[in-house]
Structures are given as C-alpha cells and as structure tokens.
Amino acid sequence: MVLRVRTTEGTKRLARLSASDEEGTMVRSVKKSKANKKKSNKIDAKKPKKPPTAFFYFLEDFRKEFQEQNPDVKSMRHVGKACGEKWKTMTYEEKVQYYDIATEKRAEFDSAMAEYIKRKESGEESEDEETEDDLEFGE
DNA sequence: CTGCTGATTGTTTAG
DNA sequence: CTAAACAATCAGCAG
C-alpha cells in the first residue's frame, strides 16, 4: 500500500518500451556526461539530478556480497548483470525494501524538482555563479 | 599515464 | 502516454 507503484502493471507502463530494439540492436550508447571532469560544468543546468533507483540501492548491498561470493569477478559490470538476474528472482517483498528507500528519495527529489520548475517558470535566466571552474591549487 | 566505455534496471522528464 | 536518457560503479583497455 505504501508502495504506490504507479498503476501497477495495469497500464503496463511502457508496454514494450522500444521492445523492437531490445533484442536486435542494443545500441545503448548513452552519451554519458562523464566526458569532462571539473571544467565545463555548465552542462547540467541546475536541474536536480536523478536519485538512485531501488536497483542501485540493491546494487550497493549486492556488490559486497557478490565480491565475497565471487572474488574472481573483477569488473562491476559483471556484478550488474548478475544483479539484474537476481533482481528479477527477488520477490516483491524483498525488493520493496529498496523501493521504499528509493521512494523516499524521490519524495525529496520531488521538492527539488518543484523548485526547479518554479524557478524555470519564474525565469530561466539565472545568474551563473559557477564562475570557479578550475580552482585547483592545493597539492 | 590518463580517461572513457560498458552493463544492470528503475526512475525521471518533457512533449 | 511515450520514448529516450540518465542515475552509480569500477576495472579494463586503448592511445
């Protein structure tokens, strides 16, 4: 009940979600914004970042277990794969634990989003205070 | 040496 | 509603 999973499967939610490509070309080449490090940070625009999903939270815990059970495994990518399969095998009750966490995060994110929209409607023209880009001295 | 890619699913966003 | 993109992580490979 607490888990408002959005209409459950009734709407099917993205029935196939581009199922046509799912099997054929897995061109999942995401642009990825990790190209830059500190410089050029104006790309994100003030938009609230997306909170980690339940899957990610599960990953955090699963990672450790996976490494213990699979000390041979190295890349985390493989973990993700294994995690994905296990994730599907997990029961709703088990996943609910993580869903609950994600739900709370989303609630918090919602507030940030509301402000973002509000500001956007008010005027996207925001002063960029992100002047400091490479202020790296220290070491 | 340095830096991006890849893989997982879920959630988010804008039209 | 829909489709696409993006969220973390970390090691491996390429130039």
Image (spheres, coloured by chain):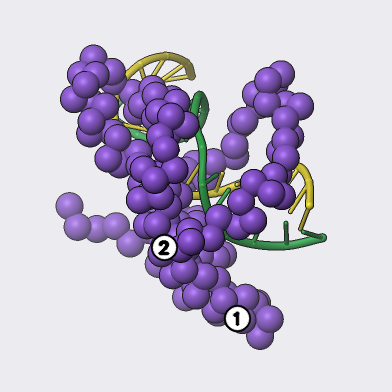
Chain colours: A purple, B green, C yellow
State whether residue A42 appears in this view: no
Mark 1–mark 2 Cα distance, whole angstroms, equals 21 Å
Q: Residue type at mark 2?
A: Lys
The residue sitting at 41% across, 64% down in the picture is A104
A84 and C4: which is toward the camera: A84
Q: Residue type at mark 1?
A: Arg
The residue sitting at 28% across, 18% down in the picture is A73
A31 and A65: which is toward the camera: A65
Task: Label 2, secondary structure: give it.
Answer: helix
What residue is shown with label 1? A119
The quadrant in which residue C4 appears is top right
Q: Which mark is residue A71?
A: none
Please tell me whether mark 1 or mark 2 is closer to you in this view: 2
**x%, y% of residue C2?**
78, 46
Residue A130 located left or right of residue A16 = left
**x%, y% of residue C15?**
48, 19
What residue is shown with label 2? A105
The residue sitting at 37% across, 57% down in the picture is A101
**x%, y% of residue A47?**
55, 65
Name which of mark 1 and mark 2 comes first in the sequence: 2
State whether residue A85 appears in this view: yes
